[in-house]
Image (spheres, grey):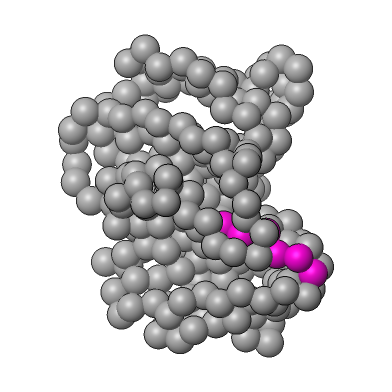
């Protein structure tokens, strides 16, 4: 099928006391052989980290890691001397390259919520990279905004893959087009907040649809909605 829906309650679940996670794809103890990723997109983890808690120093390699913070503040430290705070509305990027250690903690003041996204790189190895970008003042109302791209277009974050992450915030009743996918690419649409209709189907908060057909879709907001689209190579 080229139009596949996954409802929010079909995701994997992990509860660790201080960490509350929902997994779009197989991750850690959650394993579903039918949900191992979507093309170059390997992980979408919907995490809530309780105040003052987090992930201690741990390694990564050969993965493009993007964190979209939706609530609170995430405090980052890594083995290359990077240290910073990522606030709600900001996006963090780390290319693990040949290997990096890092830690991520919620601030002591409040819980942090984020989408942790892993994208397979188009080349292995290389020096690890770090970047973050503030999108809080970028107008997203009823238009697509590019958050991540292969070339940093429109002030987006450049990553090592022919992949894009787009977002929009739609007013109730507004529609927006989703461009057709080429034969070797696919789009995954995630409803962060709200409720939308696409191809006659209603998607609610945290529902997803995977699209791999060459067809333009119209997305209509049934109420104020925030949407992410991941446009990735499928090979």
- Rendered image quadrant of residue 221: bottom right
**Identity of the residue drawn at 47% across and 54% down:** 146
Q: Is residue 33 visible?
A: no
Q: Is residue 138 left or right of residue 212?
A: right
Q: Is residue 127 left or right of residue 201?
A: left
**Identity of the residue drawn at 61% across and 60% down:** 168
User: Residue 118, position in %: x, y?
Assistant: 42, 45
Callout count: 0
* Residue 170 magenta-highlighted: yes
User: Residue 127, position in %: x, y?
Assistant: 21, 28
Q: Main secondary structure of the magenta part?
A: strand
Q: Is residue 193 visible?
A: yes
Q: Is residue 159 left or right of residue 137?
A: left
**Identity of the residue drawn at 76% across and 23% down:** 110
Q: Is residue 221 above or below residue 167?
A: below
User: Residue 1, position in %: x, y?
Assistant: 46, 84
- Read off the magenta span: 167-172
């Amino acid at each position: 099928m080229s139009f596949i829906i996954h409802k929010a309650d079909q995701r994997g679940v992990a509860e660790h006391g201080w960490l509350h996670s929902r997994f779009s794809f197989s991750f850690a103890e959650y394993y579903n052989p039918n949900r191992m990723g979507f093309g170059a997109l390997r992980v979408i983890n919907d995490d809530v980290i309780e105040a003052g808690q987090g992930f201690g120093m741990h390694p990564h390699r050969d993965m493009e890691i993007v964190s979209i913070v939706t609530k609170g503040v995430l405090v980052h430290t890594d083995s290359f001397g990077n240290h910073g705070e990522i606030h709600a509305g900001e996006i963090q990027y780390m290319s693990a390259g040949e290997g990096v250690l890092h830690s991520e903690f919620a601030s002591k003041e409040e819980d942090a919520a984020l989408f942790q996204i892993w994208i397979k790189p188009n080349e292995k190895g290389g020096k690890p990279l770090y970047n973050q970008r503030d999108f809080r003042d970028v107008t997203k109302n009823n238009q697509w905004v590019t958050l991540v791209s292969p070339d940093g277009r429109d002030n987006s974050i450049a990553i090592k893959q022919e992949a894009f992450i787009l977002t929009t915030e739609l007013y109730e009743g507004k529609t927006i087009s989703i461009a057709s996918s080429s034969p070797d690419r696919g789009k995954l649409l995630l409803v962060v907040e709200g409720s939308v209709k696409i191809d006659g189907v209603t998607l609610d908060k945290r529902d997803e649809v995977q699209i791999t057909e060459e067809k333009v879709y119209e997305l209509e907001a049934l109420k104020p909605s925030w949407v992410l689209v991941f446009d990735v190579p499928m090979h």
